[in-house]
Amino acid sequence: MRRSRLIFLVLAMVFSFIGLVILQVRYITTNAKIVEEQFNENVQYTLSQTVSLIEENEALEFLSQSLEKENYSPDKKILAFMYPEGYKPSQNIDTTSITANTARPLIRLSTGHGKATIEETSRYLQELFQENFSRRKTILDQAVFRWMRQSEERSIERRIDFEDVENILHTLFDSKGITQPYYVYVVGKSGNMIYKSDNAQPLSYNIAKNASYKQQFFPLENAKNPVFLKVIFPEKQNFILKSMNLLLPSVGFMLLILIIFISTIIIIMRQKQLEIMKTDFINNMTHEFKTPISSISLAAQMLKDSSIGKSPEMMKHISAVISDETKRLGFQVDKVLQMAMFEKENSTLSLTELSINELITDIINNFSLKVQSKGGKIISKLEAKNDCAIVDEVHFTNIIYNLMDNALKYSSDKPLLLTVVTRNEKDKIFIEIEDNGIGIRKEDQKRIFEKFFRVSTGNTHNIKGFGLGLTYVKKMILEHHGAIKVESEPGLGTKFIISIPVISADIK
Protein backbone atom coordinates (compact mmCIF):
# COMPACT_ATOMS: atom_id res chain seq x y z
CA MET A 1 0.00 0.00 0.00
CA ARG A 2 1.32 3.40 -0.94
CA ARG A 3 2.06 5.87 1.81
CA SER A 4 -0.42 8.42 0.41
CA ARG A 5 -3.23 5.84 0.41
CA LEU A 6 -2.38 4.79 3.94
CA ILE A 7 -2.49 8.39 5.14
CA PHE A 8 -5.80 8.97 3.34
CA LEU A 9 -7.30 5.83 4.89
CA VAL A 10 -6.19 6.79 8.39
CA LEU A 11 -7.51 10.35 8.02
CA ALA A 12 -10.84 9.06 6.66
CA MET A 13 -11.23 6.69 9.61
CA VAL A 14 -10.31 9.43 12.10
CA PHE A 15 -12.79 11.87 10.50
CA SER A 16 -15.56 9.25 10.46
CA PHE A 17 -15.05 8.32 14.09
CA ILE A 18 -14.93 11.96 15.23
CA GLY A 19 -18.17 12.60 13.34
CA LEU A 20 -19.77 9.55 14.97
CA VAL A 21 -18.69 10.71 18.42
CA ILE A 22 -20.07 14.23 17.83
CA LEU A 23 -23.43 12.87 16.64
CA GLN A 24 -23.63 10.46 19.56
CA VAL A 25 -22.82 13.18 22.10
CA ARG A 26 -25.40 15.52 20.58
CA TYR A 27 -28.01 12.77 20.58
CA ILE A 28 -27.35 11.92 24.23
CA THR A 29 -27.37 15.56 25.38
CA THR A 30 -30.55 16.31 23.40
CA ASN A 31 -32.30 13.28 24.85
CA ALA A 32 -31.22 14.22 28.37
CA LYS A 33 -32.50 17.76 27.82
CA ILE A 34 -35.89 16.48 26.59
CA VAL A 35 -36.22 14.17 29.62
CA GLU A 36 -35.32 16.99 32.00
CA GLU A 37 -37.72 19.46 30.34
CA GLN A 38 -40.56 16.93 30.55
CA PHE A 39 -39.75 16.29 34.20
CA ASN A 40 -39.63 20.03 34.97
CA GLU A 41 -42.93 20.61 33.16
CA ASN A 42 -44.68 17.85 35.11
CA VAL A 43 -43.34 19.09 38.45
CA GLN A 44 -44.26 22.73 37.77
CA TYR A 45 -47.74 21.70 36.65
CA THR A 46 -48.16 19.63 39.81
CA LEU A 47 -47.08 22.52 42.07
CA SER A 48 -49.40 24.94 40.26
CA GLN A 49 -52.33 22.54 40.57
CA THR A 50 -51.56 21.95 44.25
CA VAL A 51 -51.55 25.68 45.02
CA SER A 52 -54.80 26.15 43.06
CA LEU A 53 -56.50 23.29 44.89
CA ILE A 54 -55.39 24.65 48.27
CA GLU A 55 -56.82 28.06 47.35
CA GLU A 56 -60.10 26.53 46.10
CA ASN A 57 -60.40 24.42 49.24
CA GLU A 58 -60.05 27.51 51.39
CA ALA A 59 -62.81 29.28 49.43
CA LEU A 60 -65.13 26.28 49.57
CA GLU A 61 -64.49 25.82 53.27
CA PHE A 62 -65.34 29.46 53.98
CA LEU A 63 -68.53 29.35 51.92
CA SER A 64 -69.51 26.10 53.59
CA GLN A 65 -69.03 27.63 57.02
CA SER A 66 -71.05 30.67 55.98
CA LEU A 67 -73.98 28.67 54.64
CA GLU A 68 -74.12 25.75 57.04
CA LYS A 69 -75.54 26.88 60.39
CA GLU A 70 -76.86 24.17 62.64
CA ASN A 71 -80.31 25.65 63.51
CA TYR A 72 -81.09 27.35 60.18
CA SER A 73 -83.89 26.21 57.89
CA PRO A 74 -83.20 26.30 54.16
CA ASP A 75 -85.00 29.66 53.96
CA LYS A 76 -83.01 31.05 56.90
CA LYS A 77 -79.77 29.92 55.24
CA ILE A 78 -80.61 32.22 52.38
CA LEU A 79 -81.08 35.09 54.88
CA ALA A 80 -77.82 34.27 56.57
CA PHE A 81 -76.05 34.37 53.23
CA MET A 82 -77.65 37.78 52.44
CA TYR A 83 -76.35 39.59 55.54
CA PRO A 84 -72.80 40.18 56.87
CA GLU A 85 -71.34 37.84 59.43
CA GLY A 86 -72.52 38.51 62.96
CA TYR A 87 -75.76 40.08 61.88
CA LYS A 88 -78.83 38.36 63.35
CA PRO A 89 -82.02 39.05 61.46
CA SER A 90 -85.11 39.72 63.59
CA GLN A 91 -87.39 36.77 64.26
CA ASN A 92 -90.52 38.49 62.88
CA ILE A 93 -89.25 38.44 59.27
CA ASP A 94 -91.90 36.91 57.09
CA THR A 95 -90.02 34.14 55.30
CA THR A 96 -93.20 32.99 53.62
CA SER A 97 -93.10 36.05 51.45
CA ILE A 98 -89.63 35.06 50.31
CA THR A 99 -90.87 31.59 49.58
CA ALA A 100 -93.84 32.94 47.78
CA ASN A 101 -91.67 35.15 45.65
CA THR A 102 -89.64 32.15 44.64
CA ALA A 103 -92.68 30.04 43.69
CA ARG A 104 -92.91 28.89 40.08
CA PRO A 105 -95.27 31.17 38.09
CA LEU A 106 -98.33 29.82 36.41
CA ILE A 107 -97.94 29.79 32.65
CA ARG A 108 -101.09 30.22 30.59
CA LEU A 109 -101.01 29.55 26.91
CA SER A 110 -104.71 30.11 26.24
CA THR A 111 -105.52 33.23 24.22
CA GLY A 112 -108.75 33.62 26.14
CA HIS A 113 -107.05 35.22 29.16
CA GLY A 114 -105.55 38.19 27.40
CA LYS A 115 -103.31 39.17 24.54
CA ALA A 116 -99.71 37.97 24.06
CA THR A 117 -99.75 35.66 27.05
CA ILE A 118 -96.44 33.95 26.05
CA GLU A 119 -94.63 37.30 25.70
CA GLU A 120 -95.86 38.48 29.07
CA THR A 121 -94.83 35.21 30.70
CA SER A 122 -91.33 35.38 29.13
CA ARG A 123 -90.88 38.97 30.33
CA TYR A 124 -92.02 38.00 33.79
CA LEU A 125 -89.53 35.12 33.96
CA GLN A 126 -86.67 37.32 32.80
CA GLU A 127 -87.44 39.94 35.44
CA LEU A 128 -87.62 37.25 38.09
CA PHE A 129 -84.28 35.73 36.95
CA GLN A 130 -82.56 39.12 37.00
CA GLU A 131 -83.91 39.81 40.47
CA ASN A 132 -82.72 36.44 41.80
CA PHE A 133 -79.33 36.74 40.05
CA SER A 134 -78.75 40.25 41.44
CA ARG A 135 -79.69 39.14 44.95
CA ARG A 136 -77.47 36.05 44.89
CA LYS A 137 -74.56 37.93 43.33
CA THR A 138 -74.80 40.42 46.16
CA ILE A 139 -74.75 37.59 48.65
CA LEU A 140 -71.65 36.02 47.02
CA ASP A 141 -69.87 39.40 46.80
CA GLN A 142 -70.45 39.99 50.50
CA ALA A 143 -69.21 36.48 51.33
CA VAL A 144 -66.09 36.90 49.19
CA PHE A 145 -65.42 40.30 50.77
CA ARG A 146 -65.61 38.79 54.25
CA TRP A 147 -63.31 35.91 53.06
CA MET A 148 -60.69 38.30 51.72
CA ARG A 149 -60.84 40.45 54.87
CA GLN A 150 -60.47 37.48 57.17
CA SER A 151 -57.73 35.86 55.01
CA GLU A 152 -55.45 38.85 55.52
CA GLU A 153 -55.79 38.53 59.29
CA ARG A 154 -55.29 34.72 59.46
CA SER A 155 -51.80 33.14 59.71
CA ILE A 156 -50.53 30.82 57.00
CA GLU A 157 -50.70 27.88 59.41
CA ARG A 158 -54.46 28.45 59.81
CA ARG A 159 -55.05 28.95 56.10
CA ILE A 160 -53.13 25.87 54.86
CA ASP A 161 -53.38 22.28 56.02
CA PHE A 162 -49.83 21.06 55.33
CA GLU A 163 -50.94 17.43 55.46
CA ASP A 164 -53.40 18.17 52.65
CA VAL A 165 -50.56 19.75 50.68
CA GLU A 166 -48.48 16.58 50.92
CA ASN A 167 -51.43 14.36 50.04
CA ILE A 168 -52.29 16.44 46.98
CA LEU A 169 -48.65 16.45 45.87
CA HIS A 170 -48.39 12.70 46.29
CA THR A 171 -51.58 12.08 44.28
CA LEU A 172 -50.63 14.44 41.45
CA PHE A 173 -47.04 13.15 41.24
CA ASP A 174 -48.35 9.58 40.96
CA SER A 175 -50.72 10.61 38.17
CA LYS A 176 -47.74 12.09 36.29
CA GLY A 177 -45.62 9.00 36.83
CA ILE A 178 -43.13 10.80 39.11
CA THR A 179 -41.99 8.28 41.70
CA GLN A 180 -38.66 9.81 42.70
CA PRO A 181 -38.18 10.75 46.37
CA TYR A 182 -38.70 14.43 47.18
CA TYR A 183 -38.63 16.88 50.10
CA VAL A 184 -41.52 19.31 50.76
CA TYR A 185 -41.00 22.76 52.32
CA VAL A 186 -43.12 25.85 52.96
CA VAL A 187 -40.89 28.91 53.11
CA GLY A 188 -41.30 32.63 53.45
CA LYS A 189 -40.09 35.41 51.19
CA SER A 190 -36.76 35.69 53.00
CA GLY A 191 -36.22 31.94 52.88
CA ASN A 192 -37.29 31.23 56.47
CA MET A 193 -38.71 27.74 56.82
CA ILE A 194 -42.33 27.52 57.96
CA TYR A 195 -42.84 23.79 57.41
CA LYS A 196 -40.89 20.78 56.16
CA SER A 197 -41.93 17.17 55.58
CA ASP A 198 -40.79 14.48 58.03
CA ASN A 199 -38.08 13.03 55.77
CA ALA A 200 -36.81 16.38 54.48
CA GLN A 201 -33.22 17.48 54.93
CA PRO A 202 -32.43 20.99 56.24
CA LEU A 203 -32.63 23.74 53.63
CA SER A 204 -28.85 24.08 53.85
CA TYR A 205 -28.61 20.57 52.37
CA ASN A 206 -26.28 20.59 49.38
CA ILE A 207 -28.43 19.95 46.30
CA ALA A 208 -28.26 20.91 42.66
CA LYS A 209 -30.07 24.13 41.76
CA ASN A 210 -31.99 22.53 38.92
CA ALA A 211 -33.45 19.97 41.37
CA SER A 212 -35.40 22.60 43.33
CA TYR A 213 -38.87 23.88 42.35
CA LYS A 214 -40.95 26.70 43.92
CA GLN A 215 -44.54 27.98 43.58
CA GLN A 216 -46.22 30.83 45.48
CA PHE A 217 -49.31 30.20 47.57
CA PHE A 218 -52.31 32.47 46.75
CA PRO A 219 -50.48 34.13 43.84
CA LEU A 220 -53.44 36.52 43.06
CA GLU A 221 -53.24 38.14 46.49
CA ASN A 222 -51.05 41.21 46.84
CA ALA A 223 -49.47 39.92 50.02
CA LYS A 224 -46.61 41.76 51.72
CA ASN A 225 -45.07 38.49 52.92
CA PRO A 226 -45.75 35.86 50.27
CA VAL A 227 -45.36 32.20 51.14
CA PHE A 228 -43.95 29.59 48.76
CA LEU A 229 -44.31 25.85 48.28
CA LYS A 230 -40.86 24.39 47.62
CA VAL A 231 -40.11 20.82 46.48
CA ILE A 232 -36.61 19.34 46.09
CA PHE A 233 -35.77 16.13 44.21
CA PRO A 234 -32.39 14.92 45.57
CA GLU A 235 -32.06 12.10 42.99
CA LYS A 236 -33.09 14.03 39.91
CA GLN A 237 -29.74 13.61 38.15
CA ASN A 238 -29.80 9.86 38.78
CA PHE A 239 -33.32 9.72 37.34
CA ILE A 240 -32.18 11.46 34.15
CA LEU A 241 -29.22 9.13 33.81
CA LYS A 242 -31.40 6.06 34.39
CA SER A 243 -33.85 7.28 31.77
CA MET A 244 -31.03 6.96 29.24
CA ASN A 245 -30.31 3.30 29.96
CA LEU A 246 -31.41 2.43 26.44
CA LEU A 247 -28.56 4.59 25.14
CA LEU A 248 -25.92 2.52 26.92
CA PRO A 249 -25.76 -0.12 24.16
CA SER A 250 -25.04 2.61 21.62
CA VAL A 251 -22.24 3.91 23.84
CA GLY A 252 -20.89 0.36 24.13
CA PHE A 253 -20.97 -0.06 20.36
CA MET A 254 -19.19 3.26 19.97
CA LEU A 255 -16.42 2.10 22.30
CA LEU A 256 -16.24 -1.16 20.37
CA ILE A 257 -15.86 0.80 17.14
CA LEU A 258 -13.10 2.84 18.79
CA ILE A 259 -11.26 -0.34 19.79
CA ILE A 260 -11.68 -1.77 16.30
CA PHE A 261 -10.52 1.50 14.80
CA ILE A 262 -7.37 1.66 16.93
CA SER A 263 -6.65 -2.02 16.29
CA THR A 264 -7.06 -1.50 12.56
CA ILE A 265 -4.66 1.44 12.58
CA ILE A 266 -2.09 -0.59 14.55
CA ILE A 267 -2.45 -3.56 12.18
CA ILE A 268 -2.11 -1.31 9.14
CA MET A 269 1.01 0.33 10.55
CA ARG A 270 2.52 -3.04 11.41
CA GLN A 271 1.71 -4.37 7.97
CA LYS A 272 3.38 -1.32 6.49
CA GLN A 273 6.48 -1.92 8.60
CA LEU A 274 6.40 -5.62 7.72
CA GLU A 275 6.19 -4.73 4.05
CA ILE A 276 9.26 -2.52 4.39
CA MET A 277 11.15 -5.23 6.28
CA LYS A 278 10.18 -7.85 3.70
CA THR A 279 11.51 -5.58 0.98
CA ASP A 280 14.79 -5.25 2.87
CA PHE A 281 14.78 -9.02 3.38
CA ILE A 282 14.45 -9.64 -0.36
CA ASN A 283 17.23 -7.14 -1.09
CA ASN A 284 19.51 -8.76 1.48
CA MET A 285 18.65 -12.27 0.32
CA THR A 286 19.45 -11.32 -3.27
CA HIS A 287 22.76 -9.87 -2.18
CA GLU A 288 23.57 -12.91 -0.01
CA PHE A 289 22.78 -15.36 -2.83
CA LYS A 290 24.49 -13.35 -5.52
CA THR A 291 28.02 -13.73 -4.16
CA PRO A 292 28.19 -17.56 -3.82
CA ILE A 293 26.32 -18.06 -7.11
CA SER A 294 28.79 -15.77 -8.88
CA SER A 295 31.74 -17.64 -7.35
CA ILE A 296 30.34 -21.04 -8.38
CA SER A 297 29.58 -19.72 -11.86
CA LEU A 298 33.11 -18.38 -12.22
CA ALA A 299 34.62 -21.70 -11.08
CA ALA A 300 32.47 -23.56 -13.60
CA GLN A 301 33.66 -21.26 -16.40
CA MET A 302 37.26 -21.87 -15.38
CA LEU A 303 36.66 -25.60 -15.64
CA LYS A 304 35.16 -25.17 -19.11
CA ASP A 305 37.90 -22.80 -20.34
CA SER A 306 40.45 -24.92 -22.22
CA SER A 307 42.99 -22.11 -22.15
CA ILE A 308 43.39 -22.46 -18.39
CA GLY A 309 45.77 -25.20 -17.36
CA LYS A 310 44.18 -27.94 -15.29
CA SER A 311 47.01 -28.60 -12.89
CA PRO A 312 46.26 -30.57 -9.72
CA GLU A 313 46.73 -27.43 -7.62
CA MET A 314 44.31 -25.44 -9.82
CA MET A 315 41.72 -28.21 -9.71
CA LYS A 316 42.04 -28.40 -5.95
CA HIS A 317 41.60 -24.66 -5.65
CA ILE A 318 38.53 -24.60 -7.90
CA SER A 319 37.03 -27.57 -6.05
CA ALA A 320 37.58 -25.81 -2.74
CA VAL A 321 35.91 -22.64 -4.01
CA ILE A 322 32.90 -24.59 -5.29
CA SER A 323 32.66 -26.55 -2.04
CA ASP A 324 32.89 -23.47 0.21
CA GLU A 325 30.43 -21.42 -1.80
CA THR A 326 28.00 -24.32 -1.99
CA LYS A 327 28.11 -24.67 1.78
CA ARG A 328 27.62 -20.93 2.12
CA LEU A 329 24.67 -21.05 -0.27
CA GLY A 330 23.18 -24.02 1.58
CA PHE A 331 23.55 -22.17 4.88
CA GLN A 332 21.62 -19.18 3.49
CA VAL A 333 18.91 -21.48 2.12
CA ASP A 334 18.55 -23.03 5.58
CA LYS A 335 17.97 -19.57 7.05
CA VAL A 336 15.27 -18.83 4.51
CA LEU A 337 13.61 -22.17 5.27
CA GLN A 338 13.49 -21.16 8.93
CA MET A 339 10.73 -18.72 7.99
CA ALA A 340 8.31 -21.60 7.46
CA MET A 341 8.96 -22.73 10.99
CA PHE A 342 7.91 -19.33 12.43
CA GLU A 343 4.37 -19.82 11.13
CA LYS A 344 3.95 -23.01 13.16
CA GLU A 345 2.87 -22.85 16.76
CA ASN A 346 5.26 -25.60 17.79
CA SER A 347 8.29 -27.13 16.13
CA THR A 348 9.27 -30.77 16.24
CA LEU A 349 12.16 -31.01 18.71
CA SER A 350 14.42 -33.98 19.23
CA LEU A 351 14.96 -33.63 22.97
CA THR A 352 17.76 -35.33 24.83
CA GLU A 353 19.63 -34.90 28.11
CA LEU A 354 22.79 -32.84 27.58
CA SER A 355 25.44 -31.06 29.59
CA ILE A 356 25.10 -27.38 28.73
CA ASN A 357 28.67 -26.60 29.83
CA GLU A 358 30.09 -29.26 27.50
CA LEU A 359 27.88 -28.12 24.62
CA ILE A 360 28.99 -24.51 25.03
CA THR A 361 32.63 -25.58 25.31
CA ASP A 362 32.43 -27.34 21.93
CA ILE A 363 30.78 -24.29 20.33
CA ILE A 364 33.44 -21.97 21.74
CA ASN A 365 36.24 -24.21 20.38
CA ASN A 366 34.74 -24.14 16.89
CA PHE A 367 33.90 -20.43 16.96
CA SER A 368 37.14 -19.19 18.50
CA LEU A 369 38.96 -19.39 15.14
CA LYS A 370 36.65 -16.74 13.66
CA VAL A 371 37.07 -14.49 16.67
CA GLN A 372 40.85 -14.86 16.75
CA SER A 373 41.08 -14.13 13.01
CA LYS A 374 39.72 -10.65 13.78
CA GLY A 375 41.99 -10.10 16.76
CA GLY A 376 39.42 -10.92 19.42
CA LYS A 377 39.12 -13.52 22.12
CA ILE A 378 36.53 -15.50 24.04
CA ILE A 379 36.44 -15.75 27.82
CA SER A 380 34.36 -18.58 29.30
CA LYS A 381 33.20 -18.83 32.91
CA LEU A 382 31.14 -21.99 32.99
CA GLU A 383 30.33 -22.01 36.71
CA ALA A 384 26.97 -23.78 36.66
CA LYS A 385 27.28 -26.94 38.74
CA ASN A 386 23.92 -28.36 37.73
CA ASP A 387 24.12 -28.00 33.93
CA CYS A 388 22.07 -30.99 32.73
CA ALA A 389 18.97 -30.00 30.73
CA ILE A 390 16.56 -31.57 28.25
CA VAL A 391 17.25 -29.77 24.94
CA ASP A 392 17.37 -30.29 21.19
CA GLU A 393 21.11 -30.40 20.47
CA VAL A 394 20.88 -28.97 16.93
CA HIS A 395 18.56 -26.10 17.75
CA PHE A 396 20.26 -25.23 21.03
CA THR A 397 23.64 -25.18 19.28
CA ASN A 398 22.17 -22.80 16.70
CA ILE A 399 20.91 -20.56 19.53
CA ILE A 400 24.36 -20.12 21.05
CA TYR A 401 26.05 -19.89 17.64
CA ASN A 402 23.65 -17.17 16.40
CA LEU A 403 24.22 -15.02 19.50
CA MET A 404 28.01 -15.36 19.17
CA ASP A 405 27.83 -14.66 15.44
CA ASN A 406 25.80 -11.48 16.11
CA ALA A 407 28.43 -10.35 18.60
CA LEU A 408 31.07 -10.81 15.91
CA LYS A 409 29.03 -9.05 13.22
CA TYR A 410 28.19 -6.04 15.36
CA SER A 411 31.61 -5.63 16.97
CA SER A 412 33.18 -2.18 16.87
CA ASP A 413 36.57 -1.27 15.47
CA LYS A 414 38.27 -2.43 18.66
CA PRO A 415 39.04 -6.17 19.10
CA LEU A 416 36.06 -8.24 20.16
CA LEU A 417 35.94 -9.45 23.74
CA LEU A 418 33.28 -12.14 24.05
CA THR A 419 32.40 -13.44 27.52
CA VAL A 420 30.30 -16.58 28.07
CA VAL A 421 29.06 -17.33 31.60
CA THR A 422 26.87 -20.09 33.03
CA ARG A 423 25.38 -20.09 36.53
CA ASN A 424 22.58 -21.69 38.50
CA GLU A 425 19.60 -20.11 40.21
CA LYS A 426 17.10 -22.44 41.86
CA ASP A 427 16.04 -24.97 39.21
CA LYS A 428 17.35 -23.06 36.21
CA ILE A 429 20.63 -22.54 34.40
CA PHE A 430 21.47 -19.04 33.15
CA ILE A 431 23.65 -18.50 30.10
CA GLU A 432 25.10 -15.01 29.60
CA ILE A 433 26.74 -14.02 26.32
CA GLU A 434 28.28 -10.54 26.54
CA ASP A 435 30.29 -8.52 24.03
CA ASN A 436 31.93 -5.11 23.85
CA GLY A 437 30.40 -4.19 20.48
CA ILE A 438 28.40 -1.22 19.25
CA GLY A 439 25.41 -1.90 21.52
CA ILE A 440 21.71 -1.53 20.84
CA ARG A 441 19.54 1.54 21.38
CA LYS A 442 16.69 1.20 23.88
CA GLU A 443 14.03 1.85 21.25
CA ASP A 444 15.49 -1.02 19.17
CA GLN A 445 15.78 -3.42 22.09
CA LYS A 446 11.99 -3.88 22.14
CA ARG A 447 11.96 -4.98 18.50
CA ILE A 448 15.09 -7.00 17.96
CA PHE A 449 13.17 -10.28 18.30
CA GLU A 450 10.64 -9.29 15.60
CA LYS A 451 10.76 -11.09 12.28
CA PHE A 452 12.80 -9.27 9.58
CA PHE A 453 13.77 -6.46 11.97
CA ARG A 454 17.39 -5.42 11.77
CA VAL A 455 19.18 -2.81 13.84
CA SER A 456 20.17 0.05 11.59
CA THR A 457 23.88 0.76 11.35
CA GLY A 458 23.71 3.46 8.68
CA ASN A 459 24.15 1.11 5.71
CA THR A 460 21.53 -1.50 4.86
CA HIS A 461 23.97 -4.07 3.52
CA ASN A 462 27.12 -3.42 5.49
CA ILE A 463 26.18 -6.32 7.81
CA LYS A 464 24.87 -9.46 6.14
CA GLY A 465 21.69 -11.13 7.34
CA PHE A 466 17.95 -11.45 6.91
CA GLY A 467 16.68 -10.28 10.30
CA LEU A 468 15.62 -13.81 11.27
CA GLY A 469 18.39 -14.90 13.64
CA LEU A 470 17.09 -13.43 16.91
CA THR A 471 13.50 -14.31 15.99
CA TYR A 472 14.63 -17.93 15.61
CA VAL A 473 16.57 -17.73 18.89
CA LYS A 474 13.59 -16.52 20.91
CA LYS A 475 11.20 -19.03 19.36
CA MET A 476 13.49 -21.96 20.15
CA ILE A 477 14.12 -20.79 23.71
CA LEU A 478 10.39 -20.47 24.34
CA GLU A 479 9.85 -23.97 23.01
CA HIS A 480 12.49 -25.15 25.50
CA HIS A 481 10.32 -23.51 28.21
CA GLY A 482 12.96 -20.87 28.78
CA ALA A 483 13.28 -17.08 28.54
CA ILE A 484 15.66 -14.55 27.03
CA LYS A 485 16.29 -10.88 27.72
CA VAL A 486 18.78 -8.30 26.53
CA GLU A 487 20.80 -5.64 28.33
CA SER A 488 22.65 -3.14 26.19
CA GLU A 489 24.14 0.34 26.11
CA PRO A 490 25.13 2.00 22.81
CA GLY A 491 28.91 2.05 22.45
CA LEU A 492 29.48 -0.24 25.44
CA GLY A 493 28.21 -3.63 24.30
CA THR A 494 25.35 -6.07 24.65
CA LYS A 495 24.50 -8.92 26.99
CA PHE A 496 21.98 -11.67 26.20
CA ILE A 497 20.74 -13.68 29.20
CA ILE A 498 19.13 -17.07 28.57
CA SER A 499 17.42 -19.19 31.23
CA ILE A 500 16.12 -22.75 30.81
CA PRO A 501 15.02 -25.41 33.31
CA VAL A 502 17.61 -27.99 34.42
CA ILE A 503 17.11 -31.56 35.57
CA SER A 504 16.77 -31.77 39.34
CA ALA A 505 19.68 -33.39 41.17
CA ASP A 506 17.19 -35.69 42.95
CA ILE A 507 15.93 -37.00 39.59
CA LYS A 508 19.48 -37.67 38.41
Image (cartoon, rainbow, N blue to C red):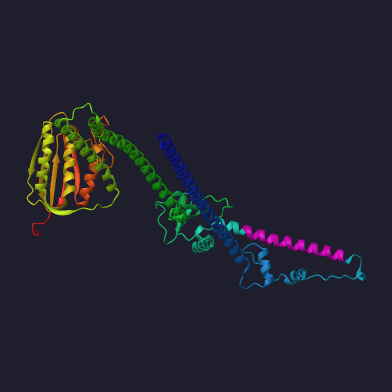
- Could you tell me which residue is drawn at 26 percent across and 39 percent down? 467
- Could you tell me which residue is drawn at 17 percent across and 37 percent down? 407
> Depth check: 205 or 28 in front?
28
Q: Position of residue 48 (x, y in %)?
A: 55, 55
Quarter of the image for the N terminus: give it: top left
Range covered by the magenta-colored residues: 118-145
> Depth check: 214 or 286 in front?
286
The stretch drawn in magenta includes residue 127 = yes
Quarter of the image for the C terminus: give it: bottom left
Determine whether 379 is above or below 76 in the image: above
Q: Position of residue 85 (x, y in %)?
A: 62, 63
Determine whether 366 is above or below 105 in the image: above
Q: Residue furthest top?
A: 307
Seen in the image, is 402 located left or right of residue 263?
A: left
Q: Is residue 176 visible?
A: yes
Seen in the image, is 52 located left or right of residue 353?
A: right
